[in-house]
Amino acid sequence: MKDRARGGRGPGADDDRPMSVLVVDDHPAQRAYARCVFEALGCEVFEAADGIEGVGLADLQRFDLILMDRYMPRCDGDMATRRIRTGDGPSASAVILCHSVEPPPGQAAALYDRFIAKPITTYQVLDLIPGKPKPQRFKFDVRVRTAPTRVRRTRAAR
């Protein structure tokens, strides 16, 4: 990830407060799912239903990480990210992740620190937070053995 020159704490900084995350998405189910993933990792999560609401929250409060959907009504993710970055709000130096089905093209990609495909997974989030222990991925070797079955014929079947 890029370093933020204006002194953002960034994910995984060593202090006692939980990492604050802003989830900006117009779909309530996506916001709820992202909230569950981040809260399970001990983050403090805030939600915004569109880009305008996200910019407003980012102007009022300092967030360590912003998960930004690209396609939203009223104000899309690219425009909201540009407003946050160029503003003087406390979240101007926050790490902003593009959260979409497809990566942003060309110049839009430069706005974001990283692309995360939908749906977000716990493993993707763990890769963003240095110092968090990574759970081991398990490979299951399932071998099903079936006992030979005997078919008994009853008198009615004969």
Image: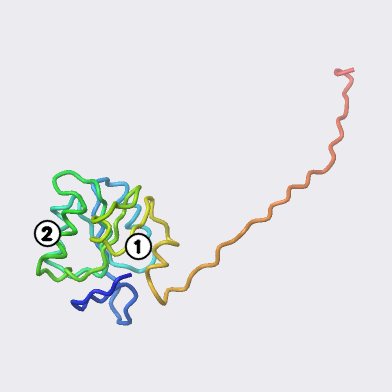
The mark total stands at 2
User: Which of the image's four quarters has the C terminus?
Assistant: top right
The amino acid type, in three-letter code, at marker 2 is Gly
**In the displayed structure, would residue 45 be above or below residue 33?**
below
Dot 1 or dot 2: first in sequence order is 1
- SS for tag 2? helix
Kindly identify the amino acid type of the residue bearing the numbered disc 1.
Answer: Phe
Q: Position of residue 22 (x, y in %)?
A: 24, 61
Determine whether, in the image, residue 53 is placed left or right of residue 103.
left
Where on the picture, by quarter, is residue 67?
Answer: bottom left
Which residue lies at the image location 26% right of the left edge and 52% below the top edge?
A: 69
Quarter occupied by the N terminus: bottom left
Q: Quadrant of residue 87?
A: bottom left
Element at label 1: helix
Q: Residue 156 carries which label?
A: none
Residue 121 placement (x, y as % from top left): 42, 57
Residue 113 location in percent, x, y? 29, 64
Between 2 and 14, the one lying in front of the other is 2
How many residues crowd mark 2 within 10 Å: few (<14), some (14–19), many (20+)?
Answer: some
User: What residue would you read off at disc 1?
Assistant: 38
CB atoms of marks 1 and 2 within 8 Å? no
Residue picked out by circle 2: 56
Q: Quadrant of residue 84?
A: bottom left
Q: How crowded is mark 1: few (under 14 residues within 10 Å), some or many (20 or more)?
A: many
